[in-house]
Amino acid sequence: MGGISPEREISLQSGKAVANALSKDNNNNVIKIIVNDDMVNELDNYKIDVAFIALHGYFGEDGGIQGILESKGIPYTGSGVFASRLAMNKSESKNVFRRNNIPTPEYFNASMVQSMSVITDSVKKLKLPVITKPVSNGSSIGISIIKEYAGIKDAIKHTGSYSKEILVEECIEGRELAVSVLGDKALPVIEIKTATGVYDYDAKYKSDNTQYIILEPGDKTSECTLSHAIYDRVQDLAVRAHKHLGCRTFSRADMILDKNGNIYVLEVNTIPGFTERSLLPKAAAAANISFAELCNSIVNADCKYERSVQACIHDNNVVNAKI
């Protein structure tokens, strides 16, 4: 937990929550490792059965820590190096969505070195409003919404201070949904409502006015329901996005449902938060899975996966193995 990304403080909260939950099981011997650099030499001080990764942002979700753990032969929770890197890159993951007929908002890539006239011309093709996001960052850090052409320069400058690569995306108005996947199954759908209409860092972690509504499928769409067809579609898209990115064990897909019933997948998070405000634990609770059960199930699933990998290596069957 911790890490070297702007999401360090959230990661510390997630890590402490996970450690406390796993410690409740007397069979678990939990060691907290606070990551302060990209070496993590402390890993060499222990015999580790499995590393529970609660690192958010780069080095945590982009395959960085996963690569180090693999080099040391330490099993870990969540997605592997390639899937982590792919999902963390919003532009690359959207390319995967497009290739697999998963609807996602229109977008283009920009950078600080491009001229404002070129960026403005591209924005005009998308039409306002648009949203700028760091290509590889989480927790809605560094985002800006552009409602007028005069605001393009400031938005690019703000987002560019967090990332050299910038995603400029069509801003779809509608209901913001989050669908977590555990194993190969989608958990209950959650709708997020904010006071400002934007689910940014403050709305996620600071505001007391952010609402998290557990939705149910119903005959009539209301504030607490989605039609059966849309509910099933939303869950199906979350699972498909999870699988096409190559994710493992768990993830969370963020989506927008517009007023015409169209669904757009924005991104997939391979290490979503594990704080008291986080969406994966809320969805698990709605499925009658306690936080401790959730954390233990993740550990057990990845231990099982690692044993399967080792068995395939032992049998010299790695190329043909389907795990």
Image (cartoon, rainbow, N blue to C red):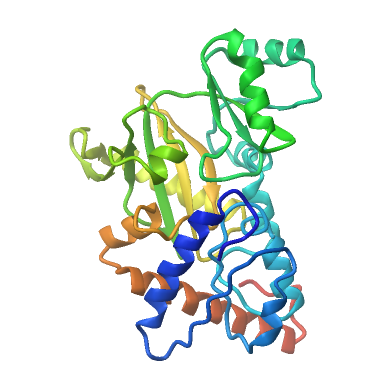
Q: Quadrant of the N terminus?
A: bottom right
Given residues 158 and 166, the one toward you in this image is 158
Residue 204 visible: yes
Question: Is 247 placed left or right of 283 in the picture?
Answer: right
Q: Where does the image place residue 219, in percent across and percent down from the top left?
A: 18, 37
Q: Quadrant of the C terminus?
A: bottom right
Residue 184 visible: no
Q: Which residue is depicted at the point 61% across and 80% down?
A: 306
Q: Which residue is depicted at the point 68% across and 34% down?
A: 161
Image vertical order of residue 255 relative to residue 42, above or below: above
Question: Is 13 placed left or right of 53 in the picture?
Answer: left
Q: Quadrant of residue 125?
A: top right
Q: Where does the image place residue 304, in percent across and percent down from the top left?
A: 54, 81
Q: Which residue is depicted at the point 63% across and 16% down?
A: 152
Given residues 248 and 227, the one toward you in this image is 248
Q: Where does the image place residue 28, in percent across and percent down from the top left?
A: 45, 87
Given residues 192 and 265, the one toward you in this image is 192
Image vertical order of residue 66 relative to residue 48, above or below: above
